[in-house]
Structures are given as structure tokens and as C-alpha cells.
Amino acid sequence: MKQGYSYRFGSRGARSAPYLLLAPGLLLYLVIALGPSVATAAYSFTDASGILGSPIKWIGLDNYKEFLLMGANVRDNLQVTENTFLFCILVTVVQTVFGLAAAILLDMRMRLSNFFRTVYFMPTILGFTIVGLVWSLFLYPMGGPMQRLLGLLGLQSEFLGGASMRVFYWIVWIQIWANMGVTMIIFMGGLQTVPAELREAARIDGAGSWQVFRHVTFPLLTPSLNTNILLEIIGSLQAWQLFLVVKGPTNGINVLSIWVYALAFGRQSNNPTGIAMRQGYGAAASMVLFVIVLVVGMITQRVLARREGRILG
Amino acid sequence: MRKRWVFVALVAFLALPVLAFAGDVTLELLIHQNAPLVDYIDAFNKKFEAKYPGIKVNVSVVKADELAMSTQTRLTANDVDIIDMFGFAQGIQPYMKGADKPNWQALIEAGLLMDLTGQSFLKNFDAPTIKDAGSFNGKVYEVNTGRYAFTGVFYNKDLFAKYKVKVPTTWKDFVAACETFKKAGVPAIACGGKDGWPVLVAGYGIILSMYPDQAALVKGLWQGAIKWNDAKSLQMWQRMQVLARDLIEPGASGVAFDAAPGRFASGATAMLCAGSWDAPAIATANPKCNFGYFPLPGSDKAADNKYIAGKYDVGWVVNAKTENKDAALKWLALFSDPANYQAYVTAVGVIPTQPTAKLDTTLGREIAPYLANFRLGYELLWVQPKGAGQWAQPNAAFFKPYNQFDDAKKLADQAQADLDAGLKAVK
């Protein structure tokens, strides 16, 4: 015991106090996060339907075999996985670029900067349901605002009801629109940490705006960039809300997360009109998604950490 | 002293609602979104609450494609008493190897649905309905309240008269009628394409015309006697493509299913491909809309197009673990009373399942000539083999602009290949 200090709980209590204080938070994490995750993993090896009172049988790897190897499921589920990666790449790249551009513009402290910051951030607080409904109305092909604009040019589009990939790209755009505010705020925080004198010094040495950005600002934004990329990759791999609101889980192109929802809560083996609760099967699909997110997340983190170490030393 | 009185006042304030409702029963009802159904149930519940003052009814409304999931979660949470459940369908046949049992069967086997066998109100309903739509292993679990037809087409009689178009009885006449309207600048057919399933349902009329014995079609597909890419099926696909690409109006892929009846009712289109459940919505949207209903003629022979297919729709099941059993049974009994049931039929537009009730509406009169040829639709019978691909379905919405296919032969081959993948996997 250090001289001059008294411990309220005594020396033994002092050693156990941190663990006791951590216990409530840990318990909450176990009950709300880790526990259900472990339960999902366990369910994935059963034929659980999720119906209270239905017997649950251990079926080993049958769900995984059905999802990954059975019949045409291989093709369909692989396609859904490809869609998931495509969605992730598009959202991550475009959202990062747009978020950075918005942050740089707002950092210039022009007139109405605060107003525009609020406007850009507002979609984030609306929630996916409202965002999806707003865009569904905006893109209504029978006279919605966008259709009226196209109509002036003699054009027409099916928008969200059109050919599957068109809907997919619209959902990518809406996802970016809904989340760009967060990316922008993180970048703005990063820009605050870039010392103004470094930029000044570069300008005095004759660097143009682009050179200042490329060689001074952007390298120092590495921590913010890494945070944004990691958040966007993990978030977009798990995105499903807009797919549900805009098109529903049994209609057209899907990504893995909404596919998991459809399989666990309604789809009868790829039959859009059949209903069967198969939460064991859905759990297996969600474990596949978990592994993908885990692997991609870990690789991304390692690559970004190395890059940060190389740039910032 | 003052603090003590403030404390007493606070406790009393909080306790008042509890005391006020002590002894009151709240019956939780779950139904799917169908505007006339929701309106009728709201009005009926007021009548029920007036008759039974100690019982309140609380209604939750969900979209039709979320009803199954909501049912399962509410039953698990045991916070629902009466549930709207579509008539029992997709029963597993002996030749369907490895198929998933339907949800309703899983709920019954889990002991979650109340056995209603012997309840007096069941006698008000016709025996075939009780047997076909609500029974399992000799016991009754559902009171089915009505059937809908979904292989027909609503048509605007005034527009048909204006452009001198007769009600088509063959596929050729149907296409010609649509072309007449298109040339006159009137979109031919409205459909709620955004949700996908209305276009799927629109194609059912073509399937029915090609394969009037829908049960035989299902069996033939499972056993290989019928293929999705044989000559007859190919014609079916080609006609589905024409329907989706050429006859349903452009932009329909962005119209939600509950917006399509309004478009038709407003006179924006000459026809509407939808189930007969939309008749009350049309009448409400425009009481002056002079509409009729005919079977979609998918065949070149008029004799093949006299059938109409549909499904058993809203049925009532009761949570087996409900604490309000008495109240739930009272609700069902009052609902099943012939006078109330007749009001329900008129409001919601179902084909009655009580022998004493009549659908004395525009739709009822239009559909009456076809009721003798009423068949259960394909989707009520089809169970997909596990491992079958996503294209193993006769779905008009697979064609552009709703999905990726613009070649009927390619889709026919793909559909059969996807089905074969499943049949092989479950052998």
C-alpha cells in the first residue's frame, strides 16, 4: 500500500474492486451480445424452427451442407455472397470519397457551414425505415419527383422496381446517402487534428492546394480514414434494413444479411410463396456471414494498421 | 407530513390506471393489412366491446408477407390471443421427399394453436371449408372466413364500352383487347409490381388455363411427368413474358400492391390484375367505378378459360396458451354469427364459407358464374424441394422489367434445371 493513500475497501478489496466494477458491464455484454451469438452458433447445428414447443434436434452440419452444397443453393447463395461483396466495395469506396469531400468543404468554414453540416448529417438520424420510404416516394415511377424530372427530358425509368441490378445500385446510393454524415463527421474530427502550421509551411514552400492535401493533410488523416473504412466495410457487409424497406426479402436481388432474415423467418426453400420457419438454417447462414465479416474485418484491420504505421511512424 | 401526502398522491396517481382496468380483459388480435378487413374489424370490435363491456380488443396490423413471422414471435411471447392466418395450405404429400412442413403444421404440433373441435360456432361454416382450410389430423384449428379468387382480371366496363372491346375469352382476344387500349393511349393493365408477388399472381391465370388440374401439375413436376421446359410449359412462359413485358403498364414495377387498385379505380388503366380481395378497395377508391371481373384467358380455347382459382384467405386461430380463452371464444362466436358474418362478407368481399351468406356485391355477381369451377390455386399446393434454385417457380415476375430474363426459352430451361437440382438433391 502506497504511503499517504488509504483504500476504502482495504488492500484485498482494492485488488478485487476493478473486477467487481467491471462485472455489470461484462454481464450486460454476455447477456445481450456474446450469449445470443453463441446461442446462434449452437442453433446452426440444429433443426430449430423458432416455434415455441417444437422439438429441437441436433443435425450436425446438415444446415451448412444445405446452404453451401445442396443443389442449386450453391449457385444462389454464391450469387448472394457476390452481391454482398459488391455492395460492400461500392458503399465503402463511394461513401469514403464523398464523406471526405464534404468534410474538406465544410472545414473551409464558408458561410452556412453549420447549416450544411446539419443537412448532411440529418439522414443519419432519420433511420433506415424513414430513409427507405422517403426515397421510395421520391422515385415513384408514376409521377414521383424524379420521374417528373426525367419526363421533362422525355425519359422514363422503373427506378426501384426496375431490373434487379438497377434496384441494387439505387440501394447502394441510398445507403451512402443515409450514412455519409457519419463518415463526414469522423473526417472533420480528423481534420481538426491536422496542425494548421504544417499546411502553412507547405504553402510557404510553394505547394499548391492539391499538393498540400496529398502530402500533408491526407497522410495525417490516416487514423480517421482507417476508422471510416473499417466501419463502412463491417456496416455494409451486415446491411439489410434498406433492402427490407425498399424491396422486401423475397423480391429480386439480395445480399447475405437480408437473405438470412428471409431464410430464418419465412422462406420455404427458395419458394417465395411458401412459409416455413427454419431458424436453425437461418442461423447457419448467419454464421457464414459472421465468418465473412470476421475474416474481412481482420484482414482490413491488419492492412490499415500497417499502413498507418508506415505513414505516421 | 407534507412529503408523506405528496408520496401518497403519487402512488394513487400511478395506481389509478391499474385500478380502473382491474378486472378488464384485453384481447390481443393480430391481422394482416387489407384495408376493408381492417375497417370491418375496427367496427366489429366496437360492437363486441359494447356487448361485452369488460373486454377490450387491441388490434395489431402487419403486412401480409410479415404475418407468418409476426405470428411466430407473438405466439412465442404469448402476447396474442386471436390471429388471422391464411387457410392451411402446402400440405406435404407422400411424394414430396425432404420437404419442410408448412408453418401452420409446425405451430399445431408445437401445441401453440387451440383445438376448436366441437365449438358450436363451427356449425355455421360449410363442412368442406372446415375440413380443407382449418383441420389437421381430424381436429379443427382454424375457422376460415372466406375465399378469394386470384386468377381473374378486373376490367373497367365504361372503358370497354367506350373503345368497343368485348370481354376476352381467349388469349388472342385478351392480347388484342390490351393492344386496343394501348393504341388509344390508355394503359392496359395495372399491377402492384413493386412487391413482386402481384405479378406472380397475375401469371396464375395463365398456369390455370394451361393446367386446370393444379394438383396434378404439382405431382407431375415432382415426379418428372411434367417439365417446365416442355412444349406446353414453354407456351405458358411465353405468354407470361407477354403479360409482364407488354400488357402490364410501364412503371408498374414501382407501384406498391395497395396502390394499384386506386390507379385502376381512377380510370388510369382499363384493367387490373389482382385478386378479388381488391374489389372493396376499388369500390372505396371510386364508388362510381363500373367494374367487372373475368378469368384471365391464358389458353387459345375458351373452354379452358372457364376456371377460376384462388385460396382460402383469412381464418381465425387461437393461441393455445391464451389467458383469455373465454373472451377469445366469445369473439369468434360473435364473429361467426350469420348476421355479423354476412356484414363481413359484404365489407371485405370474400367468397363466403357460410352456406347462408351471399356475396351480394358487384364482385359477387361477376364471379358467381365461375364459382362452380373454383379451384385451389397452384401456390396453395406447391412445395418446393430443398436445393431447388430460385428460378424453379412459374413466375411472370422473372421477366424484365421485374427481373433479369428476356428470353422465355432460357427461363423455361433455367426453371427446369433449378427444379431438377432440388429433385436430385432430395432423392
Image (cartoon, rainbow, N blue to C red):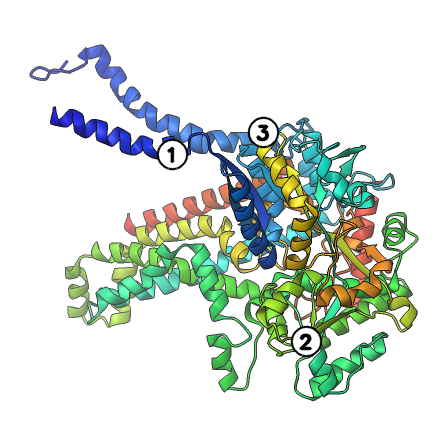
Residue type (three-letter) at the residue carrying disc 1: Ala
Asked if one can make out residue A289 in the rendered structure from this viewpoint, the answer is no
Element on which disc 1 rests:
helix
Judge by depth and name the residue closer to the eye, B338 or A16. Answer: B338
**Direction left: furthest residue:** A4
Q: Nearer the viewer, mark 3 or mark 2?
A: 2
- The residue carrying mark 1 is B20
Q: Position of residue A174 (x, y in %)?
A: 46, 63
User: x, y (%) of residue A76?
Assistant: 68, 52
In this view, the residue in front, A55 or B80, is: B80
Q: Determine which residue is flagged by label 2.
A: B290
**Which mark is nearer the camera, 1 or 3?**
1
Which residue is labeled 3 in the image?
A42
Question: Is residue B5 shown left or right of residue B316?
Answer: left
Which residue occupies 64% across, 76% down? B250
Q: Mark 3 is on which residue type?
A: Ala
Q: Position of residue A163 (x, y in %)?
A: 62, 68
Name the chain letter of the residue that bears numbered label 2.
Answer: B
On screen, B98 above or below B321?
below
Please name whichever residue, B1 or B270, is drawn nearer the observer in this view of the structure: B1
Quadrant in the rendering for residue A25: top left
B166 lies left or right of A169: right
Which numbered dot is residue B196? none
